[in-house]
Amino acid sequence: MESSVCPFCHLSVPSSELQWHANSHFEDEDKEANDMELGNQIQIASSSGSTDVVSISSLIGLQTRSNFYHVKDGLISLLRNCLELEARHNSSVTILSGYVDHFQSLPSVDVGWGCGWRNIQMLSSHLIAHRKEARKVLFGESGFVPDIAFLQRWLEIAWESGFDPPGAQHFNCKIYGTNHRIGTTECASLFRSFGLRARVVDFGPKESELLYLSVPGSTFGQPVKQRNAVRVSGPMDKYVHRQQGLIKGRHFCHSLHNGKSDNAKGKSEGPQVLIDWVWNYFSDKGLTISGSSQVVVSDRAPLYFQHNGHSRTIIGIQVKHQKNGANQFNLLILDPSDGTVALERSLKTNVGWQKLIKRGVHTLKKPQYQLCYIDPGIASGEELNELKTINSIFFEL
């Protein structure tokens, strides 16, 4: 790959990214000024003992749009084209979420700690583009995805408003300007503070059921003092609540498992439980596989996908119907650690995109996983108050 030297910072970058990288220096000047102003206001308010460190109106005025590489034709549209070409040669069904921008971790900004924030940005880009009710409440109706520093401030405001007290205590209610890693509960807390119905689902071994898996900082296993009862509200809550207690030894996706899974061995389903949950999430009421191939765009939002040490965004799922009757599943994932330009190039040329985006059941080797999904609608009143407590639903792997 050819590289060029940036005339401003003298960093060697891929030639295809040079213009975008160089332009970012000018955008960064405005961001640094706003970051400095926000920092000054936080310092003044903190010294005065104010509980509302920076008013929401001030934050709305100061926040800046996150800098990212914009794919002209949209990654989901490019991916759909590739999947449709692929489907000509096999019997498969693929379900995708709608429009999503890819936010990559940047070497000079957040590599090593920012994946959680980048996935929140990906989910936000979808919600702003697809859900009018979300666009009206997210980030002060700004209509754009803020930079990480301002997302950190929005999370602090969520904590100050009483969302996720254990998480707030873990971080001492302060995360702005730090390199702290975040996890699924922080994602849920931030979105819930705007009234969005963000839900957390845990997958793990039976012995983890009484443990609080949604631990800040992408670490699993701290004990929880109390696991509250599940409150059924959104459509997916009804599904997972109904399936509780039916996890071990059977699949949920009956329409898919008239045949057999590629990992069915007559014992615990293992990661197939997670795969089935994701399939049912995107298909909602389920799809029946026929002999024809198809690529379907769902109205479901992407999923925040966490395991110990890293998080990614699930943008869809594919199932291939094998000649031997088995079903081969692939999660379709956007990873913040991948470069957006490389993703775009692989999809436009239809070369190598599978290695970047597809993840089969055999790759799910971690003992525990978490998902955060967002049901439609905006909570208010008593429901919004109840959302301040982060509950999760547990599924045994």
Image (tube, helix red, strand yellow):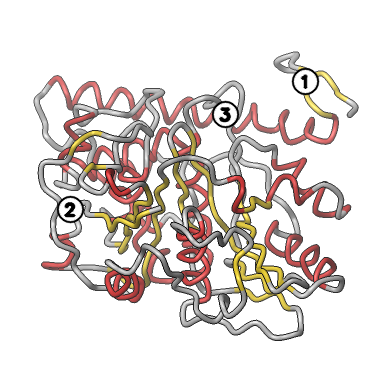
**Which residue occupies 11% across, 47% down?**
226
Dot 1, crowdedness within 10 Å: few (<14), some or many (≥20)?
A: some
- The answer to whether 73 is drawn above or below residue 85 in the figure is above
Distance from the alpha carbon under mark 1 to that under mark 3: 15 Å
- Answer left or right for 37 relative to 31: left
**Which residue occupies 51% across, 59% down?**
272
Q: Earlier in the sequence, mark 1 or mark 3?
A: 1
Q: Are marks 1 and 3 in contact (CB under 8 Å)?
A: no
Question: Which quadrant holds the N terminus?
Answer: top right
Residue type for callout 3:
Asp
Picture quadrant of residue 200: bottom left
- Check residue 378 in the rendering and tell me which mark sits there, or answer none: none
Residue carrying label 2: 388
Residue furthest front in the image: 266
Circle 1 — which element?
A: loop
Closer to us: 358 or 2: 358
Q: Earlier in the sequence, mark 2 or mark 3?
A: 3
Q: Position of residue 53 (x, y in %)?
A: 19, 33
Instruction: Count numbered badges in the picture.
Output: 3
Closer to us: 268 or 373: 268
Distance from the alpha carbon under mark 1 to that under mark 2: 46 Å
